[in-house]
Image (tube, rainbow, N blue to C red):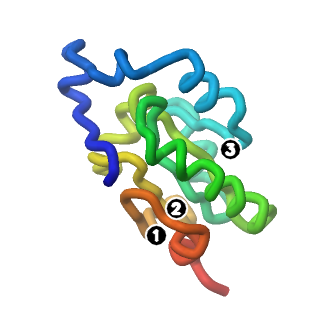
Amino acid sequence: GPCALFLEEALAGENPAKIVRSSTVATFFSMKNSIPLVTDQTFAEEVLSSAVPVIVDFGAEWCGPCRALEPVLDKLAKAQEGKVRVVRIDADESPETTARYGVRSLPTIVTFVAGEVFKRHTGLTSLEGLTNLLPTG
């Protein structure tokens, strides 16, 4: 199932994620990923002001299902190039945006159209599942 996100516990320092986190996982999440990363600072500009629909992947380095979803998001980004933007946000590093959109489990996918939430999905999904989160026509 999806990874539960307990920001309060994470911030209190008793974070099992820190133990799980290894350099390979961190590298996989940040460097080998072709999906651009947005942050609390860049979210409004990159997502809310976008002229095309944006799929936002809320995830974290320590979340296994998040990593499993990355190749699927990558396929979607390539299939919808020019029509849809696919970005990701690290829930640990961007707690304000994560809280603003009520994300409590990872991965959570939220589609934004003209700056508004269009659809959302929590947990792993297929390419077809992701495509169903997009506006048609």
Image coordinates of residue 20 in percent, x first then y, are 39, 22
Task: Please give the name of the residue rendered at 60% of the width and 48% of the height, measured from the top-left corner.
Answer: 70
* Residue neighbourhood size for the residue with mark 1, other residues' Cα within 10 Å, grouped as few (<14), some (14–19), many (≥20): some
Image coordinates of residue 116 in percent, x first then y, are 46, 63
Instruction: Quote the CA–CA distance across marks 1 and 2.
Output: 5 Å
Q: Which residue is the extreme one toward the bottom? A: 137
Q: Is residue 59 left or right of residue 29?
A: left
Residue 59 vertical position relative to residue 72 in the rendered view, above or below: above
Q: Is residue 35 left or right of residue 40?
A: right
Task: Please give the name of the residue rendered at 67% of the width and 86% of the height, measured from the top-left corner.
Answer: 137
Q: Is residue 121 left or right of residue 137?
A: left
Query: Which residue lies under the disc numbered 1?
Result: 118
Q: Nearer the viewer, residue 4 or 91?
A: 4
Q: Amino acid at mark 1?
A: Phe
SS class, disc 2:
strand
Q: Which residue is the extreme one toward the top? A: 13
Q: Amino acid at mark 3?
A: Ile
Query: Which residue lies under the disc numbered 2?
Result: 112
Sequence-wise first label, 1 or 2:
2
Query: Which residue lies under the disc numbered 3?
Result: 35
Total numbered labels = 3
Sequence-wise first label, 3 or 2:
3
Q: Amino acid at mark 2?
A: Phe
- Circles 1 and 2: CB atoms closer than 8 Å: yes
SS class, disc 3:
loop
Which quadrant of the figure has residue 1?
Answer: bottom left
Q: Nearer the viewer, residue 113 or 35?
A: 35
